[in-house]
Image (tube, rainbow, N blue to C red):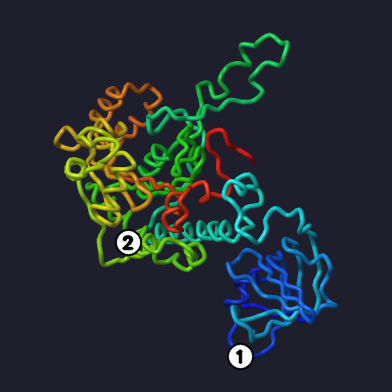
Amino acid sequence: MLLRRFASTSTLPPTIRQLLSSLQPTGHVTKVQLSGWIKSVRRQKNVTFAVINDGSCASGLQAVLKPDATPHNLTNGASVRICGNLVQSLGRGQSYELHVEAVDVLGECNPEAYPIQKQALPVEFLRDNAHLRARTDINAAMLRLRDSVLRTLHSYYEAQDFHYVHTPILTSNDCEGGGETFRVSPASSAPSSGQSPDPSAQAEFFSQPAYLTVSSQLHLEALAASLSRVYTLSPCFRAERSQTNRHLAEFWMLEAEWAFINHVGDVCYVVEESLKNVLLQCRSENALLWKDGDEAKLKSLEDASRPEIPWTRMSYTDAVKELQKYHASSRVGFEFQPAWGRALQSEHERWLSEQLVGSPVFVTDYPTSLKPFYMRANDDGQTVACFDLLVPFIGELVGGSLREERYSHLVEAIQRHGLKEEYGWYVDLRKYGSAPHGGYGLGFERLISWMSGIENVRECIAMPRWAKRMLL
């Protein structure tokens, strides 16, 4: 059988997306072979319609089969290999359809037992079947969006001459100082039942306590002192027991650090430019996700992507004044009374971005007491050169700062926070050619939530983990 050849260096056959995007409306018949899964089957008296999809795009491809050539086990969920002629479709809803000459069912799927049916399925049901939920249209679209966003971010950083680096998953310190870490130890370290504890077996594997990382920032700073501009996308872990729609125990963090930067506003600029680039470049992946979405949220997202309108910046002090003003004048007010020196709560963050500004807003220069030890102290002696990016309907999306590059200031901050000697290597970076530098961290699942309109980050990652829940 002669199959359509593509101008590609790939040794793999074309996907449905590649096939459809390469076709020109010439009216010629194209003979192809495709593999994928059946998404739906409609059997009629004289013809059978089936939709096949390999996950490469949202639409899939309609296959048209003669009744006598339709296998009895051609059902929803079955994996197939189909050969036939690709022609322009006369029906609505698709530009091309496949007139099938031969079909092989590679893997059967019992339609009565298959959990993923065509009708809408409850969120909790899909969480219980996390190994199968990627087969739903919405979850597959979310996964393609993650891929598209990551590719776009890689392109942006490459254009800015950043180096993509890999940082440790195992670490000896808690970067944020919040204490919400997972401790790691070998399973073999515990004595078997009935055996006496062996002191040597109980020793730390690394000669000191080890934890799953909560942030790559400190290690990125070490690498930025050599490569100038570095970034990574890495899994992070927090023993966070909050059951909110914004928290996961395992999540992905995009983090960037670069040297020779002197103003926190320059960090904000990189964040804004990169995110607007993502919002503009990844719109096509969002069509299915926003099909029945909130139009006000979608308009807010589209407005945020406009290059000609800069995102608002305000200091923490000014933000608190606005929050206090609203709290005093409103009959309802906030659950948590805003005050200078107190952390902004989720309700405060959303009011600032949704009501006061109506778009993403950078809140800068928080009190020293609210932020980690590594942020650079401002000249006022009360605040640090930092920011949180707050976005509508999400709250905090990005956090960043200038880092304290001055040796004596950093030592003082570490002592003030009561931290220990495991940060000695971090202080050491300030002894040898210390340079002004800064960076930020972005919660990848929160970004996907904002872009897709999916309200809970548990649906913005393939296999979510949170307190008391890890199915796979």
Examine the rendered structure and indicate whether residue 70 appears above or below residue 453. below
Cβ atoms at labels 2 and 1 below 8 Å apart: no
**Horizontal and vertical percent position of residue 320:** 20, 41
Cα gap from disc 2 to disc 1, whole angstroms: 40 Å
**Horizontal and vertical percent position of residue 325:** 16, 43
Q: Nearer the viewer, residue 135 or 414?
A: 135
Q: Residues within 10 Å of mark 2 (few under 14, many from 20)?
A: many
Label 1 secondary element: loop
- Depth check, mark 2 against mark 1: the one in front is 2
Give the number of marks: 2
Identify which amino acid the numbered label 2 is placed on: Ala
**Horizontal and vertical percent position of residue 267:** 29, 50
- Say which quarter of the image contains residue 293: bottom left
Q: Residues within 10 Å of mark 1 (few under 14, many from 20)?
A: few
Task: Tell me which residue sits at (39%, 66%) in the image.
Answer: 280
**Tag of residue 304:** 2
Most extreme residue toward the left is: 380
Most extreme residue toward the top is: 196
Examine the rendered structure and indicate whether residue 356 appears above or below residue 419. below
Residue that numbered label 1 is attached to: 26
**Horizontal and vertical percent position of residue 345:** 31, 39
In the shown orientation, is residue 223 left or right of residue 77?
left
- The quadrant in which the C terminus is found is top right
Q: Nearer the viewer, residue 5 or 76?
A: 76
Identify which amino acid the numbered label 1 is placed on: Thr
Most extreme residue toward the bottom is: 27
Examine the rendered structure and indicate whether residue 24 appears above or below residue 384. below
